[in-house]
Structure formats: C-alpha cells, structure tokens
Amino acid sequence: MKLYTYFRSSAAYRVRIALNLKGIGYESIPVHLLKNGGEQHDDAYRAVNPSELVPALETEGVTLGQSMAIIEYLDETHPMMPLLPPDALGRARVRALAQTVACDTHPLTNLRVLRHLKGALGLSEEDRNAWYRHWLGEGMRVLEAQLANGAATGRFCHGDMPTMADCFLVPQVFNARRFDIDLAPYPTIARIDAACVDIPAFQAAHPSQQPDAEG
Amino acid sequence: MKLYTYFRSSAAYRVRIALNLKGIGYESIPVHLLKNGGEQHDDAYRAVNPSELVPALETEGVTLGQSMAIIEYLDETHPMMPLLPPDALGRARVRALAQTVACDTHPLTNLRVLRHLKGALGLSEEDRNAWYRHWLGEGMRVLEAQLANGAATGRFCHGDMPTMADCFLVPQVFNARRFDIDLAPYPTIARIDAACVDIPAFQAAHPSQQPDAEG
C-alpha cells in the first residue's frame, strides 16, 4: 500500500495510526501542503485524488480517499486488532465519536479554510485564531461530553482497546496543542490521549516521526 | 424509533431517506433550529445530543448522533435493501462519496457556521452567500469528478440501486437548489438526483413532506 500523506495533516495522521495498530506496512508518499502553494493542487495529485486533500491510500490498484472510509476499509480487510466493537450500538458510538472530529471539528479548522479566511475574507491573524479556537473548542466540548458521560468509555474512547475513535481523537489533540489550547476543560480527552501515547503504534504515527517531518 | 429532526436539515434528510428506503417506521420529533435562537440549544435537547445538532435517533434505549453513524447502524441492523455494496472496495467508495458531502461540504455551509459568519465576524449577506457558494461549489466539483470518472457509477452513485452515497447526495442538491446554485457544471450529480427523485422513499423524506414543514 502507498499512503499519500503530509506529516502534519491530522487526517493522514489518523490513517497512519490505524495502519500501525494493524501492523500493515506501507510506503509514505509525501504531499507537501504548503510548498509552491500546495502540492495537493498539482495536476499529478489531482489525478490521484480530485478532492486535493490528503490522505489517499493506493491499494488493490485503486486509490481511496477520506480518512474514515480508508480506516473502515483497513478494518474490513485486516480484521486483526479490530478498530470497531463487535456490537452495532458500539460501532455506532465509535463512528459518532470519530465523526464529531471528522465532520464537526476538523473541517472548520483545516488548512484550506484558514487560507480562505485570510485570502478571500482578509481576516487578520487574530481573527483567524479566534475562529480556530471557537470551532476547535466547540468540537472538544462535545467530544468531552460524549466521553465523560458514556458508560462504554474505558481506558480508551470505547472500552480498554483502541478503536477508530482514538485514531481520530489523538490527531485532534495534537492540533489543539499546536495552537496552545488549554486542555484542562477536557480531562477525559486528555486522559485518553495520554493512554494512546503509551502505545508504539501511536508514537510511530506522530508527525515528528514521519519521513517528511520538519522542525 | 424516534428521530429528532428538522424538516430543512440536510443531515436529518439523509437519515429520513435511509429509514424510508428500508421501510422502517419511526416517530418524528421536530427540533426547530430557528425558533427562539434554536431549540437544539435547549437543555432538554442538549441532554439528548450534546452536539446540539440534528439528527439524533432514539433506538434500543439509547440515542445515536451523527447521520453517517446512524445510517451505518440502520444498515447493520436492517439488512434488507442494503445501503453499502458487498465488496470492501465498493464500500470504501460509497463511504468516501458520502464523506465528500459529510466532511468536506456540509460542515462549512450549515446553519451554525452561517450564523457565526454573521454574528462573530459581522459578514454581510453578500459575503456569507459568497462563502456558501465557494464551499458548496468546491464540494460539488469534487463529487462530480468522483462520480463522472468512477467506473462503478451507474443509475445511482454506485451501481443501479441506491446506496448511502445517494442518501447524502440528494439533500446536498436540495441545499444547492435552495441557494440557486446552477447545476449545469454537475451533470452526473443532476442525473443521479433525478433518478432518486423518482423513488417514493426519497419523495417521502423531502423537507416539504415533513410534519414540521413550513412554506
């Protein structure tokens, strides 16, 4: 498998965690999101993924987009170390937690949106930071409420083994730290993040450990 | 089952389509997203769904959030009229199409974001419309490219039976029409939307057919 990735992309980070948890070897193909206006907009990458976003996974002769669809695919084709629980209600809960990040938090704070706020709307850095903090805070508030009040929450988001939800939580926390967001209001998130960071699969997926990492 | 819904919410519309395609009866509990600043922010609803978003589905004594997680749950527990194809690559494709809407398009154009652009950023109606058209257009461009170039595209998004991807496409097209977006650049999307509109399950899920519909 080949993973089109950027070290700091939190969507690519999710997939790297899933690949590592399952012990699936893969080749990293870095796509630099900042250089020359962004390599993701080059014709070559657009042919790979018309969304001009990372990650994309090349497998079985096709290219898959969307981190959540990719992780579901990995879980179906590599059942060892399942990333979804065995019961339908549990799977719904794990997917909903992941989607709190994937649908309600990250899309509002990713690079293309911050660029648009600057370029098209002319927002100051201060206003862009306020935007970021608002939507990230809203997403973290909801995730914390879901986790703190969920009877199924264990050492990890769902029980005592990592699931797809943890693959989404950790990169979101990484983003929060990069922007100096105080994690004190989110104790359950912080506790689960700390449990994940103990696991080599999570460590190896960290942005700093990628071949394209920058200081 | 009880569905917390708002007639015009495109996320609730997706779940209504899935429920109807599977012939699952349900009770509609309307949550008015505009009245009194939005009933979704009331304590009563926040206890149901801390994200303060619709839809939410009450089933088996618990409440599920997130339209995509809900539809996956319905598909797993009601296997008749499957909404995902039988092969892993096909499922990945259908999920990725749905996520192009759920992650890359709708989160940037929903009510809470438009309100924030007005309230917190003080954007004019003209600038809010430009924002809407930009992100909706970007999402539609990607969806059109994925569908027009996909060998698996048939009468519907994936083959000749509706899938989860169609549950996401139709409400997004409904939103585009509401905002007078020209669909001419998206002929494959428009063709699939027309095929869906022929099906009673899609018709009955339309905002105009809901108990809380307004003129």
Image: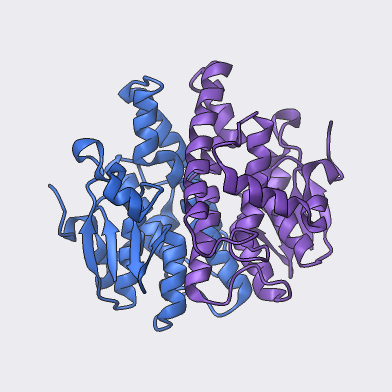
Chain colours: A purple, B blue
Q: Position of residue A119 (x, y in %)?
A: 55, 22
Q: Is residue B140 left or right of residue B62?
A: right
Q: Quadrant of the N terminus of chain A?
A: bottom right
Q: Quadrant of residue B93?
A: bottom right
Q: Is residue A129 left or right of residue B110?
A: right
Question: Given the current orientation, which residue lies at the most extreme right position?
Answer: A211
Q: Position of residue B89 (x, y in %)?
A: 63, 71
Q: Is residue A199 above or below residue A142?
A: below
Q: Which residue is depicted at the point 37% across and 51% down? A: B172
Q: Quadrant of residue A116?
A: top right
Q: Is residue A26 above or below residue B185?
A: below
Q: Is any atom of residue A103 visible in this view?
A: no
Q: Nearer the viewer, residue B173 or B78?
A: B78
Q: Quadrant of the C terminus of chain A?
A: top right
Q: Is residue B15 above or below residue A7?
A: below
Q: Position of residue B167 (x, y in %)?
A: 39, 63
Q: Is any atom of residue A188 visible in this view?
A: yes
Q: Is residue A155 left or right of residue B164?
A: right
Q: Is residue B192 above or below residue A190?
A: below
Question: Given the current orientation, which residue lies at the most extreme bottom position?
Answer: B80
Question: How many numbered circles does the render carry?
Answer: 0
